[in-house]
Amino acid sequence: MLKFLFIATLILGLILAAIPHIVWLIAWLIGKCFHYSLPYAPFGWTALALALLFWLVMILGRYVGRWRLETNQIEYVNSEIPEAFDGYKIVHISDLHLSTFDDNKKQLQRFVDSINVLEPDLICFTGDLVTIGTSEAIPYTSVLKQLKAKDGIVSILGNHDFLIYNHTLAGDSARTKEVEDLSRYQREQLGWRLLRNESTVIERDSDKITILGVDNINGKGQGFSTVNYGDLPKAMEGTDGFRILLTHDPSHWRAEVLPNTNIPLTLCGHTHSAQIRLFGWNPASWMFKESWGRYDQGQQTIYVNAGLGCTLPVRVNCPAEITVVRLKR
């Protein structure tokens, strides 16, 4: 991955450097027609500056930006929230991609400490614990087990957790076994409540809220094709009252949640906010109608978390994110 990033960064920097040269060449050829000589120096210096600036930004994104962490607070108000859950604090995290931390393991500890200091009532993890295999998680077991919340940690599986990018697995049966190993790891080693098209009830006094969790669902018309193993109707069976849905891919919200349910609050991840933001804009918005942050439509809300880890090991003005969702009546 690092080799790919280095080559891609080098090539993109050279492409940026080529743009002023192309502009100069076209202008020079036109100038020849009118017996005008266009100086090269301003274009040459511009090319050098663009390449150096791009390479500097990428270096900073890898060694500095990747470890920046922000905590975003949102207040979610709904009259249907049970009285006992007024003020309930959910910490929402997503997309750990644990191989992100292989070259700087202390950063995961810092992230975990930053979550615990918030003293959450519940931690919700919306998928992509790993990138290509369960083995990525093993070195971090002791750190992940330090995550603490009064009502525990609830999790789901994202597209990477189905190991569709691991080309060393021989056939569907091997991949299925590896996914089951990852599921057992979360439930037995970490003690998380992994929801695979099912629900869990959180009780306070005589009140309750229900957390629904589905396997990855890739809605049509957004993003890129991944996997569709989720079953929302199955997860909803026998549930009532105030419900919160954990789903990985935000395209699922418009594809099924909005048209077919009245689930008031959905939490997801997946987009990473493209790991780059320019003046508040992120390239993921080209592919996803909901790419980062909070979106409301009618009586329904979705929050898209930018994730804690990376697929490519670089973040440019796009910090890793912890979201605190405070429920209010």
Image: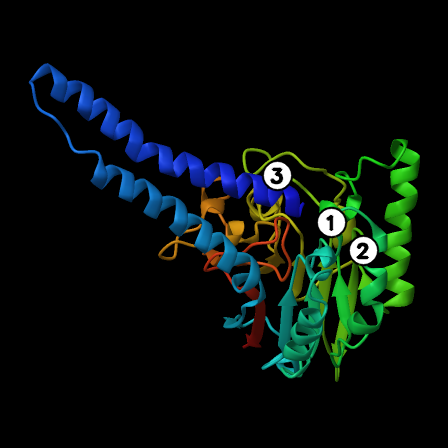
Disc 1 + disc 2, Cβ < 8 Å = yes
Q: Residues within 10 Å of mark 3 (few under 14, many from 20)?
A: many
Can you give x and y, in whole percent of width and height, for residue 121 in the image? 69, 79
State the count of labels: 3
Quadrant where the C terminus lies? bottom right
For the residues carrying marks 1 and 3, which lies nearer the camera in this image?
1
Q: For this view, does 279 lie left or right of residue 9?
A: left
**Front-most of residues 304 and 178:** 178
- Residue 234 visible here: yes
Q: Residues within 10 Å of mark 1 (few under 14, many from 20)?
A: many
> Whole-Å distance between the Cαs marked 1 and 3?
21 Å
Q: Looking at the image, which residue is at 33% across and 48% down?
A: 49
Residue 219: image tag: 3
Residue 136: image tag: 2
Dot 1 or dot 2, earlier in sequence = 1
Circle 3 — which element?
Answer: loop
- Residue 192 visible here: no
For the residues carrying marks 3 and 2, which lies nearer the camera in this image?
2
Quadrant where the N terminus lies? top right
> Whole-Å distance between the Cαs marked 3 and 2?
28 Å
Disc 1 + disc 3, Cβ < 8 Å = no
Q: Looking at the image, which residue is at 63% across and 54% down?
A: 310
Residue 131: image tag: 1
